[in-house]
Image (cartoon, rainbow, N blue to C red):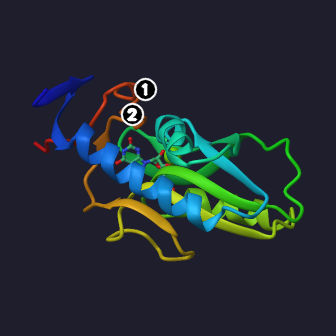
Amino acid sequence: MESVKLHDKVFESYISEAQIDQRVGELGAQIGDDFRDVDMLSIGVLNGAFVFAADLLRAIPYEVECSFVKMSSYVDTHSTGVVSELIGLGESLEGRHVLIIEDIVDTGSTLRKFMETLRGKNPASVRIASLLLKSEVFDNAFPVDYVGFDIPNHFVVGYGLDYNGLGRGLRSIYRIVEG
Ligand code: XMP
Ligand code: MG
């Protein structure tokens, strides 16, 4: 599929299914090595990270516990800057090594808020895996330890990412065609 129309906007092919597959495999192997002998809890950030989390977990070569939180800051194609936590965490994090799984880190405000919440729960460590990073706009308030692809400041959809609810089921990533 070269381009798709979602609501009123057109998106063009950007990162292929094969490229994603290969990169997620690499990240899974690397994370697998780094967390091999520790008590790890991975936390996917809903909604967008559900596809990446599913593939990443299956690319890690041993069993990993996975939970989810739900955060939201985006309306239409722009961050509102106001981040709300809609579903919180049930698990104890005390002494555990946490891996946050995100679809995309844009300005970083969503994760900054979440990291503050996590700090109060005394995890042994917190690392972040994000499929995409917009390093041009990221505020660099924390390290993103595992990055799939560093992309320019384009609005993208597919592979879990949506434009007002649509596009999450696309197998590859598309970027908006402006104008
Ligand atoms: P911040 O700015 O808080 O944004 O780092 C992170 C969250 O905003 C969403 N987001 C996007 N969603 N295409 C999307 O479909 C994008 O290009 C995009 N940029 C940010 C996403 O939910 C992420 O967790
Ligand atoms: Mg997200």
Residue tagged 1: 165
**Quick one: label 2, few (<14), some, or many (20+) residues within 10 Å?**
many
Query: Which picture quadrant has residue 107?
Result: bottom left
Judging depth in this view, the residue of 96 and 81 nearest the camera is 96
Amino acid type, callout 1: Gly
Q: Would the CB of label 2 be found within 8 Å of ligand 1?
A: yes
Residue tagged 2: 162
Do labels 2 and 1 touch, CB within 8 Å? yes
For the residue labelled by badge 1, is the local secondary structure a helix, a strand or a loop?
Answer: loop
The image's mark for residue 113 is none
In the picture, measured across the screen, residue 22 lies left or right of residue 24, that is left
Above/below status of 11 relative to 103? above
Instruction: State the CA–CA distance, disc 2 to disc 1.
Output: 5 Å
Q: Would the CB of label 1 be found within 8 Å of ligand 1?
A: no
**Percent x, y of residue 127:** 62, 66
Residue 79 shows up from this direction:
yes
**Quick one: label 1, few (<14), some, or many (20+) residues within 10 Å?**
few
Residue 130 shows up from this direction:
no
Please tell me which residue is depicted at 43% across the width and 26% down the height of the picture. 165
Please tell me which residue is depicted at 85% across the width and 65% down the height of the picture. 120
Query: Which picture quadrant has residue 4?
Result: top left
Tally of numbered tags: 2
Please tell me which residue is depicted at 73% across the width and 66% down the height of the picture. 116
**Percent x, y of residue 29:** 48, 57
In the picture, measured across the screen, residue 30 lies left or right of residue 177, that is right
**Quadrant (top left/top right/bottom left/bottom right) for the N terminus:** top left
**Quadrant (top left/top right/bottom left/bottom right) for the C terminus:** top left
Above/below status of 53 relative to 2? below
**Percent x, y of residue 148:** 38, 58
For the residue labelled by badge 2, is the local secondary structure a helix, a strand or a loop?
Answer: loop
Above/below status of 62 relative to 139? above
